[in-house]
Image: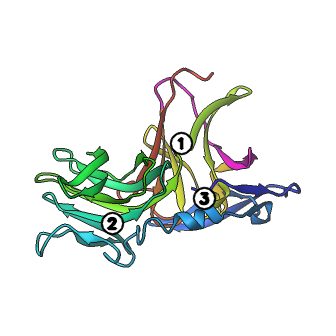
């Protein structure tokens, strides 16, 4: 995620428009609001540099730059669903890659992951040690069989070293991996929040300008029900505004704001107007309302 933003002072007026898209069952009427891209100027050399740490993290080039765990047929396979590639490892298989990290620096690796409940997927960062082989320094396990966004954070010691990041299945289980990235620092998503304005409760989605104007489709669900989404600089069934240099989007539907309600944000496949099924969606964050808002 890129954070070094420069916001222009002459922000343009928010524009609203009614738009109609085709759905699987026919046409649906979609209320959409957008912010002009000229409202923001992004200069992010750091983000470009960060891309150098992990190569081919989306597996668009198959397993190029990746090392697989063994000899055929005991190797992870590349699967494609709706045109999207991802790695599938089974029965202890893994894919791994050497990465060069700076000393005394904190890094956060983030990735899409789904894994068997009984035998979790495991992400490990370590070094190759002549005495013990792969020496694991940090690890994270996942056993959600639906896609979610995982992360692993590690601070390098003072000395120079070459590290290995490994994405594995365990025992007789399976694990899927995709969209692997790394950035410096400890990342806090904080995409979701809730609050009260006047007599109404609201759920908010906060995105960086890069994410808001990207062709990533972000959908917000409350208690498992679709409420709103954003795509390519447009907010659907919601209203965007600029808050502290980011885009805050609030729902236009009624939100009771009761304690225990669950708010979730997913990265959805496809484009607005297509299915809102969560079958191939990636869960990024969950927020549970801890007290009644009104």
- Looking at marks 1 and 3 on the same chain, the residue that comes earlier in the sequence is marked by 1
Disc 2 secondary structure class: strand
Question: Where's residue 28, x and y in %?
Answer: 56, 61
Q: What is the distance, in whole Å, between disc 1 and disc 3 at their CAs? A: 15 Å
- Looking at marks 2 and 1 on the same chain, the residue that comes earlier in the sequence is marked by 2
Q: Which mark is residue 211?
A: 3
Q: Is residue 207 magenta?
A: no
Residues marked 2 and 1 touching at CB (< 8 Å): no
The stretch in magenta equals 240-261
Residue 30 lies in quadrant: bottom right
Q: Which mark is residue 97?
A: 2
Q: Residues within 10 Å of mark 2 (few under 14, many from 20)?
A: some
Residue 92 lies in quadrant: bottom left
Q: Which mark is residue 188?
A: 1
Q: Residue at x 12, y 76 (%)?
A: 72
User: Which quarter of the rendered picture does the C terminus lie within?
Assistant: top right
């Amino acid at each position: 995620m890129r954070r070094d933003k420069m916001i222009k002072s002459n922000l343009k007026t928010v524009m609203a428009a009614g738009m109609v898209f085709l759905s699987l069952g026919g046409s649906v009427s979609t209320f959409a609001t957008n912010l002009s891209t000229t409202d923001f100027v992004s200069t992010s050399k750091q983000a470009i540099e960060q891309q150098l740490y992990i190569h081919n993290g989306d597996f668009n080039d198959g397993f190029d730059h990746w090392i697989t765990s063994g000899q055929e047929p005991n190797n992870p396979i590349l699967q494609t669903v709706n045109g999207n590639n991802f790695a599938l490892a089974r029965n202890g298989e893994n894919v791994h890659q050497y990465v060069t990290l700076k000393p005394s620096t904190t890094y956060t690796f983030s990735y899409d992951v789904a894994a068997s409940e009984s035998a979790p997927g495991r992400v490990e960062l370590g070094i190759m040690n002549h005495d013990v082989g792969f020496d694991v320094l940090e690890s994270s396990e996942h056993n959600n069989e639906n896609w979610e966004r995982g992360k692993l954070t590690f601070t390098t010691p003072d000395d120079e070293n070459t590290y290995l990041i490994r994405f594995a299945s365990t025992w007789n289980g399976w694990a899927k991996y995709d969209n692997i990235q790394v950035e410096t620092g400890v990342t806090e998503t904080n995409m979701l929040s809730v609050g009260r304005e006047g007599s109404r409760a609201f759920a908010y989605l906060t995105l960086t300008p890069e994410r808001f104007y990207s062709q990533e489709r972000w959908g917000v669900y409350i208690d498992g029900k679709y409420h709103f989404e954003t795509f390519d600089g447009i907010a659907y069934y919601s209203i965007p505004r600029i808050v502290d240099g980011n885009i805050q989007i609030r729902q236009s539907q009624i939100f009771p704001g009761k304690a225990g309600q669950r708010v979730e944000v997913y990265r959805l496949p496809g484009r607005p107007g297509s299915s809102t099924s969560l079958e191939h969606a990636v869960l990024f964050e969950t927020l549970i309302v801890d007290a009644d808002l009104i």
